[in-house]
Amino acid sequence: MEFSAKGADVFDLEKGVDSLTNFKRQTAEYLRQLHATGSPMVLTVNGKAAVVVQDAAAFQRLVEQAAKADREEAIAAIREGLADVEAGRVKPARKALKALARKYGIPTADE
């Protein structure tokens, strides 16, 4: 059993896959390796990926990175919207919704 280096950006399928049976037989060793490397491991059942195990601290970092990426994406979208307002690339919502309704044949309340 061998894991990829801590902090690796790409999951190594050659080193990060093993059977659930082996994991159950050598749980303490696998846990030691998971803690030491921070890398996830895919466990298989009958040769098919069944579950991914990962050190809790590494998982927490992953969750935090995903949340940060979501925040950054939202901030970028807000900035883009504000730039559109500044540049005059906006329409009143009711006008835009009516145009969409006409385009797609959706009846509106005032029809």
Image (cartoon, helix red, strand yellow):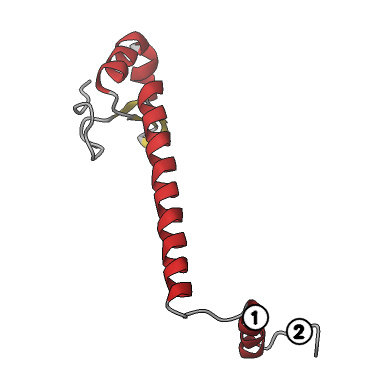
Which amino acid type is marked by label 1?
Answer: Leu
Q: Residue 111 carries which label?
A: none
How far from the left and from the top, in percent, is residue 95? 64, 84
Q: Quadrant of the N terminus?
A: top left
Indicate the amino acid at tag 2.
Thr
| Residue at image location 41% in from the left, 22% down from the top | 56
Q: Quadrant of residue 61?
A: top left
Measured from the top left, where is residue 96 in percent x and y?
61, 82
Q: In the figure, is residue 20 to the left or right of 10?
A: right
Marker disc for residue 97: 1
Local crowd size for mark 2, using a 10 Å CA cut-off: few (<14), some (14–19), many (≥20): few
In the picture, the quarter occupied by the C terminus is bottom right
Which disc, if any, is residue 108? 2
Which is more N-terminal, label 1 or label 2? 1
What distance separates the C-alpha of mark 2 from that of mark 1?
A: 9 Å
Left or right: residue 45 versus residue 11 is right
Instruction: State the residue at coordinates (56%, 81%).
Output: 91
